[in-house]
Structures are given as C-alpha cells and as structure tokens.
Image (cartoon, grey):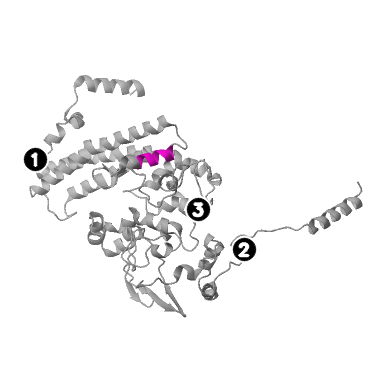
C-alpha cells in the first residue's frame, strides 16, 4: 500500500470514529459535584481559604453522592458547640452524631466498641504517668492524641487549646458523643481505602507497649500485603475477603471487614477472644462467639486444622505468660504493698517501674507477637525481655525489700531451673548444643 493510501485510510478511520457517539465518565474529582445552595456558599470561600480541604472533598464519595459541606456541618439541635457562620448555623466538629444522620448502623456499632471508650484511660496508671510523672503537655500531645480528650467549647467556634485539636478515637465531644470517625477515615476525603490500610491503624497501635503495626509488618500477612498491594482492590465498595481481594489481610480484614458469612462491623473488638492489655490476660465475655467470628476470617485463607492449631499455640503462649510471670509478679507486688514495703504512690520506687515495664511493655509484646504471628516480638522483644527483667531485676528487688518473699515463687516447677537443674538434665542440654554448634 502506498503512503498516500495509508494516509487516506487513516483519515477515513478517524472520521468514522468521530462520528460514533462516545460516552466519557468523569471521576468525582474531574466533574463539578452538584451541591446545595448552602454548600455552594461554603465552597465559594473555602476554595481559596482551604483549597486542599475542598479538593479532598471533591475526590470523595461524599461529593459524588451530593453530600456537601453543609450536609455534614449543619448544626444538630441541642449541640452546644455551634455558632453562626456567615448566615449558617454550623458545628466545627462533625461528631459521630452527625455521621449517624446517614451512617446510623456504623455509628451504633462504633459506640459499643472499645475504641469509643478509649478516653477512659484518663485516671488510669498510664495517665498518671503522662499527666503527673511526665507532665501535662506530654499527655495532651501524646496519650490524648490517640485515646482522645474531653473537648471544651469556648464559644464562637473556639475551643480550649488544652484539648483541641484532637482526633483521638475515644474523644469526648461537646454534644456528648464519643469518638472521631475521622480518626480512621480522614478529613475530608473520608476514604474507606485509607481505613483499610494497616498504616492507618499504626498511628496509635505502635511502639514499645502495643507494637501491632511493627508486628504486622514482620508477619507473613504484612509481607504479603506489601508484595501484593496493587491486587488489594482497596477502593472496592464491599471489600469482601475471598471475593474482592485474596492476596493478604490487613488489620481491617481481621477485625472489621466483611466475609462471605458476616458483614462489616465498626466494633473492632468483636472478634477478639483474649484481652492482652492488663497485667494478667483474661478471656472476654462471649469469647467463644468472638473467636468463631475471627476463625471465619482465617478460614478464607487457611485450612481448619491450621486455624485450630494456631489457636492452641496462642492459648498456650498466653497461659505461659500468665502462670509463669504475670500472676506471681502481681501477687508479690500485692504482698509488698500490703506489708508497707512499697508506698501506694505510683512510680516513686524502682520496683514499680520494673514491674510496669514487664507487663505493660514486654509482656504485651510477647502476647501480641504470638497473636499476630510476629515471632521476633514473641521471642526477643517479648519473652526474652520478660525473663531477663523478671529474674535479674524484679525478683532481686523484691528480695531486697523483704528477704525470703520470692522463695515460694522459685519453688514452683516454672522456675525450678533457677534453683538448680539436676546434673543429668544439665549434661543432656549442654551435650546437645555442643554437638549441634561444635562449641
């Protein structure tokens, strides 16, 4: 075919193509969302004042559903933290009560969750450490940014700087509601995809006392997620494991998201059978039902025998921690307090710091490492640290305060090795490792 004929053929093809009606679907961010007159009034100002906020909203499902600024910020009757803003009665803080206008089921589930009660840590030993021992601003900018503060309104859209800004998950709002939906979904995109990302939970669930994000990253789950991020379909409306995605679970998969057998829930603790937070772990009310719900999630990727054996290993690990370290340590502390060997003032004596770190830091890491299949956190960040400080610090400190108080602890089978192993047992162990490592 000559060059002329090729050019002519292309022009004919292009002409025919242009004659065919083509429907182009624009994304929410590309089109101009339809808004109410009140919402447009907000946009007219905020497009220049806070343009990033407006663009976040433009790309959101809210914008596509014609949910505008006034839809969310229009004041609820009886909310004390509202004010007149250029002819509109608005609330600065969009609380769960406001979100419940459209998301009533989700708001109710959240209200019954442990997340919603996170601000109850105020008055706890943790809060004494932050507020008193460290100092008030440390708690305001540390503890309360995750747990939540009690927000005080000063009128005319102004709030007390001691407790605002704050997006803590258990924040107590001026209208009496608990929590902040934006803690997980983010203003003003309010993205489900963001809430499904493990990093979203890692803002608070990290560090020496509850390193869930670090454990997840170490685990095969976290490795699979990073390797298959493009396959996770995070923007899916339903996001059902095994249907919409299959490569890896995230925090949301296990604790919140839907399976083919159960719906999504905003009660993040509904599938947890043990509470690993206190000094001694206990099984929660209705723990069998909770565990069955979590096993349902696991079964999308793992065989029944695998799941059952995992839970046996997990239970044995928690029982080990409870019986060998947690219960004896707690009993010794209670004896020392009762006998006047320790004062009731928190953290004024070395042994209180030692005990606190054993259960609050190291013991949690050991238990959580097993729960989330992070072996390094179970072993080296967990039980190794627990053992080292229990035997080398905690027990000697107790003996110094009251000689002989640890004798009953060391006499149990758990600690028999400390009192001296039988020569034949010791010989067998040493010979094994000498043969294995040629040392």
In primary-sequence order, the first of circles 1 and 3 is 3
Q: Earlier in the sequence, mark 1 or mark 2?
A: 2
Question: Which of the pair 242/310 is nearer the observer?
Answer: 242
Residue marked by disc 1? 403
Can see residue 157?
no
Measured in 3D between alpha carbons, the distance from the residue under mark 2 to the one under mark 3, in whole angstroms, is 19 Å
* Quadrant of the frame with the C terminus: top left
> Which mark is in front, 1 or 2?
2
Magenta-highlighted stretch: main secondary structure?
helix
Using the rendered view, name the quadrant where residue 406 is placed. top left
3D distance between C-alphas at marks 1 and 3: 58 Å
Element type at marker 3? helix
Q: Residue furthest bottom?
A: 87
Quadrant location of residue 25?
Answer: bottom right
Find the magenta span and give its range. Answer: 290-298
Task: Please tell me whether residue 236 is drawn above or below residue 84 in the rendered image.
Answer: above
Q: Nearer the viewer, residue 320 or 94?
A: 94
Disc 2: CA contacts within 10 A as few (<14), some (14-19) or many (>=20): few
Is 270 in the magenta?
no
Q: Which residue is mark 3?
A: 193
Q: Secondary structure at mark 1?
A: loop
Q: Which residue is mark 2?
A: 30
């Amino acid at each position: 075919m000559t060059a002329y004929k090729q050019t002519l053929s292309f022009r004919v093809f292009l002409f025919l193509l242009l004659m065919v009606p083509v429907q182009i679907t624009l994304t929410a961010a590309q089109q101009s969302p339809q808004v109410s007159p009140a919402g447009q009034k907000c946009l007219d100002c905020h497009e220049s004042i806070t343009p990033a906020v407006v663009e976040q909203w433009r790309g959101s499902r809210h914008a596509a559903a014609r949910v505008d600024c006034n839809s969310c910020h229009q004041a609820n009757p009886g909310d004390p933290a509202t004010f007149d803003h250029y002819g509109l009665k608005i609330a600065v803080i969009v609380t769960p009560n406001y979100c419940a206008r459209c998301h009533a089921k989700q708001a109710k589930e959240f209200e019954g969750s442990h997340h919603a009660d996170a601000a109850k840590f105020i008055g706890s030993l943790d809060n004494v450490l932050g507020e008193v021992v460290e100092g008030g601003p440390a708690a305001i900018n540390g503890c309360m940014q995750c747990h939540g503060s009690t927000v005080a309104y000063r009128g005319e859209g102004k709030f007390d700087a001691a407790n605002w800004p704050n997006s803590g998950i258990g924040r107590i709002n001026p209208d009496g509601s608990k929590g902040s939906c934006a803690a997980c979904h983010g203003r003003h995109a309010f993205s489900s995809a963001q809430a499904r990302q493990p990093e979203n939970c890692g803002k608070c669930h990290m560090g020496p006392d509850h390193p869930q994000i670090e454990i997840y990253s170490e685990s095969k789950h976290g490795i699979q997620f990073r390797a298959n991020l493009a396959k996770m379909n995070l923007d899916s409306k339903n996001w059902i494991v095994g249907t919409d995605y299959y490569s890896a679970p995230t925090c949301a998969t296990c604790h919140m998201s839907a399976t083919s057998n159960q719906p999504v829930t905003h009660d993040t603790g509904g599938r947890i059978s043990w509470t690993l937070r206190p000094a001694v772990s206990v099984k929660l009310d209705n723990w069998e039902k909770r565990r069955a719900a979590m096993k349902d999630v696991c079964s999308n990727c793992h065989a029944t025998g695998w799941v059952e054996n995992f839970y046996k290993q997990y239970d044995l690990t928690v029982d080990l921690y409870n019986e060998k370290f947690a219960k004896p340590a707690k009993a010794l502390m209670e004896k020392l307090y009762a006998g006047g060997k320790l004062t009731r003032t928190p953290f004024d004596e070395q042994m209180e710091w030692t005990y606190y770190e054993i259960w609050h830091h190291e013991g949690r890491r050991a238990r959580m490492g097993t729960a989330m299949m992070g072996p390094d956190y179970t072993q080296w960040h967990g039980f190794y640290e627990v053992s080292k400080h229990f035997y080398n610090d905690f027990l000697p400190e107790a003996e110094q305060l009251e000689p002989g108080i640890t004798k009953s602890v060391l006499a149990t089978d758990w600690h028999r090795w400390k009192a001296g192993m039988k020569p034949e047992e010791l010989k067998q162990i040493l010979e094994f490792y000498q043969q294995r490592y040629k040392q």
